[in-house]
Image (cartoon, rainbow, N blue to C red):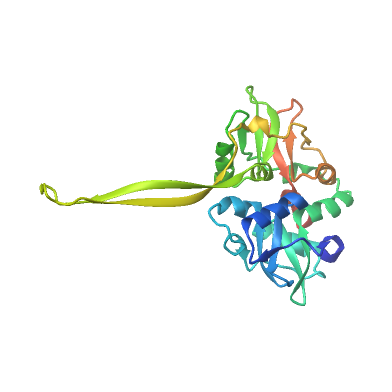
Amino acid sequence: MLVKDIMTPNPTCAEVPGSRKEILDLFHKEKISGVPVVKKGTKELVGIVTRSDLAEYPEEDQTALIMKRNPISIPPHATVEEATKILLEKDIGRLPVIEENQLTGIVTVNDIVYRAIAEMDIKEPAEKFIDNKVTSIWQDTPLQVALKIMQLSKARALLVLDYEGKLCGIVTESDLIDISEVVSETEVSSLSSGTEGDRWAWESKMMLYITKKTLKLPDKKVEDIMVTDLVTGTRRTSVSECAKKMRRKSIEQIPVIDAEGNVIGIARNIDLLKVLVK
């Protein structure tokens, strides 16, 4: 199977010059989490920008200062296995597809999971591809704290636990970014100078105003926005069945539970790719 068989042709793009608002509008309209960036009016690839980039650089407004430059790309006649190896080695979620120096498509982890693995009838159990190191969070955690935990752990999703430590929901990076806004905050510092002991000395004061932009979330708790209609799997759920579950709900991960409903790990879309390159 080739990249051209599963890629999304003529993908939605951001342009430079451009702004944060334009990127967010694209993400909301198309319900996507990352886009290639091209020079305005062309198909010349200059970068790629994701929701993670927006969260990492809240103080920046220009697309050129938020995006990652010189992204890795792949030709349309490369194999899906070749694309998979790159995505896994670089730990990235998408590859622009380039032909004759022009952007012609994009292939994402979801494309491979939804359009390839889900259709391949791979009966191998998913237990080999489960991440047992799960970042979880309490349902009463403030959203701003949840975002910080997500950034520090480099997790794209947090499993939510209730008062008894049971799984009750999941919150993703997209959930948080979608309801956030960038606000300007100004701090004031006073700098003074004078000659100590001189009663006639003039005292000069200078007020220093420092303005920075931060990503602000509403004053809510995780339980207010988390997804509670959970799709789960077990150690014995097949790889293709996991892929079908993700495709059915357009999600990128499913919690893995034992017979008693206790969380034992998480199966992520990118982890399922490993079945193609073992």
Q: Quadrant of residue 20?
A: bottom right
**Percent x, y for residue 217?**
59, 40
Considering depth in this image, is 29 or 127 the residue closer to the camera?
29
**Percent x, y for residue 26?**
72, 55
Q: Quadrant of the N terminus?
A: bottom right
**Percent x, y for residue 174?**
68, 45
Considering depth in this image, is 32 or 261 the residue closer to the camera?
32
Q: Quadrant of residue 61?
A: bottom right
In the figure, 145 relative to 184: above or below?
above
Mark yes or no: residue 33 visible: no
Mark yes or no: residue 176 visible: yes
Q: Quadrant of the C terminus?
A: bottom right
Q: Residue at x 80, y 55 (%)?
A: 111
Seen as rendered, the residue at the extreme bottom is 100
Q: Residue at x 77, y 44 (%)?
A: 251
In the figure, 254 relative to 100: above or below?
above
